[in-house]
Amino acid sequence: MNVIVLSPWALALAAVLVLALALLSLRLRLTLTQEIIIAALRTTVQLLLVGLVLKTLFTHVHLGWVVLIACVMLLIAGREVVARQRHGYAGVWGFGMSILSMFVASFSVTVLALVVFIGPTPWYTPQYSIPLLGMMLGNTMSGVALAIDRLTQTAWHQRAQIEARLLLGQDWSESVSGLRRDAVRVGLIPTINAMAAAGVVSLPGMMTGQILAGTPPLEAVKYQILIMFLVTASTGFGTLAAVWLGARRLFDERERLRIDRLRAE
Amino acid sequence: MPDIPSVVTHRSSSAMPSVVLRARLRVEKLTSHSFGPISFSLDEGECMCLSGPSGSGKTLLLRALADLDPHGGEVSLDEVECRNMRGHVWRRYVGMLPAESQWWWPTVGEHFNEIDAEKLEWLGFERTVMGWPVTRLSSGERQRLALLRLLAHQPRVLLLDEASANLDDSNVRRVETLIADYRARHGACVVWVSHDMQQIARIGGRHCMLADGRLESA
């Protein structure tokens, strides 16, 4: 591997670019200055911390540590999904349902990839498992967040229609069939677009990273294709599970629409 | 409403049919946050008109009967309790027509599982209406078509929330005749929310007022 080590000066110089952008937005009164600086600081601190965590993790390979990190990632992803909802579920339900669907989809796909496709020893080798899980969770999180947001917002606005369908004797699943289809579409479209545009419009980040690190392009491409498929599967299954759970939660045991289970705003 | 003899439970009454006990719709101590307890029963083909000041909970009462809102008390259909049927099965039998109709497919016909040409014609439509986009319908047309859509499912109980409020006189009469005919043919019972005293007189049957959360004979 012939990686060119970045000097702190290079990073500082890149930071000056962001600072310049922040100053420009201050001049233009875009009220973005604070956000830009805070986000830049967050990215620096968070990534440095992750770097430290990964460094420690790579030197102390133990299943317990990997599981711990994975759980922390899952909890943060769940929090992110809930934070992005306009009419999310009241109480802990939104959090619980997104955690459950992301867990089922991302963890099973990651474990499958580790054990069957990649096969490092031990199978949970953090150098493979943590970045892999990160990519699965990150994409699944976006899909689940978009889909649940669409589902709950449409249910909120179309409650009269849903109830009218219930009054004609449709069961809960039929009365929101259109909403569910829409929500799954919205959750999956970014992933499908990413597959369709990969390599033509954008070079995927992981492949770029591997190439920068000196991996032969075709090896990097093979990895990227694998990742694309895994990400699509994880996002798809996670979104489907979240939409099913979310749609069910809109109704009670008597199949009544319970819009009061959503937050008002 | 006389008390039911406690020895005879509801479910055993179907095995032991009795003229006294058999009711199409039986409502016992129905309560919600805005009304109750309300008890009444309706026989096959019977109609009850319901009036009362706005905000008295007439719509909420219908929604509770259709099991669309959480409620206390017991409602049974042909002596089968509501809770012994799944929600959507109950609502297939106990059909409610909301005051404002809702349409979710682009064309009218997509909302109908079967088309009764005779009824359609009686309410002043030609078959071609099924190909119309929903946006083309006037509010009165929507209301009449929504009634036909509900009747196509052949509910045993009809809950009508001001079913003819947006209609002109001749259409009001036609809707009344249609429902009277449906009651007679299917033995369906009807709870009809209406403000129009002349209409209530024409429909006949019982007339109750809902006021202060209680049901009183008018």
Image (tube, coloured by chain):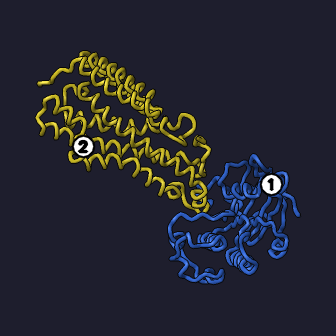
Chain colours: A yellow, B blue
Q: Quadrant of residue A42?
A: top left
Q: Quadrant of residue A124?
A: top left
Disc 1 crowd rating (10 Å Cα; few below 14, some 14-19, many 20+) is: some
Q: Looking at the image, do the residues carrying marks 1 and 2 touch, with CB atoms under 8 Å apart?
A: no
- For the point 80% across and 59% down, which residue is it? B40
- Residue A197 position in % (x across, y down): 25, 48
Q: Which residue is mark 1?
A: B56
- Residue A56 position in % (x across, y down): 28, 16
Front: mark 1 or 2: 2
Q: Amino acid at mark 2?
A: Ser
Q: Quadrant of residue A146?
A: top left
Q: Amino acid at mark 1?
A: Ser
- For the point 58% across and 55% down, which residue is it? B86
Disc 2 crowd rating (10 Å Cα; few below 14, some 14-19, many 20+) is: few
- For the point 15% across and 24% down, which residue is it? A3
Is B158 on the left or on the right of A201, as rendered? right
Q: Which residue is mark 2?
A: A202
Mark drawn on residue B69: none
Callout 2: chain? A
Q: Relative to A59, say whether A196 is above or below.
A: below
- Residue A7 position in % (x across, y down): 21, 18
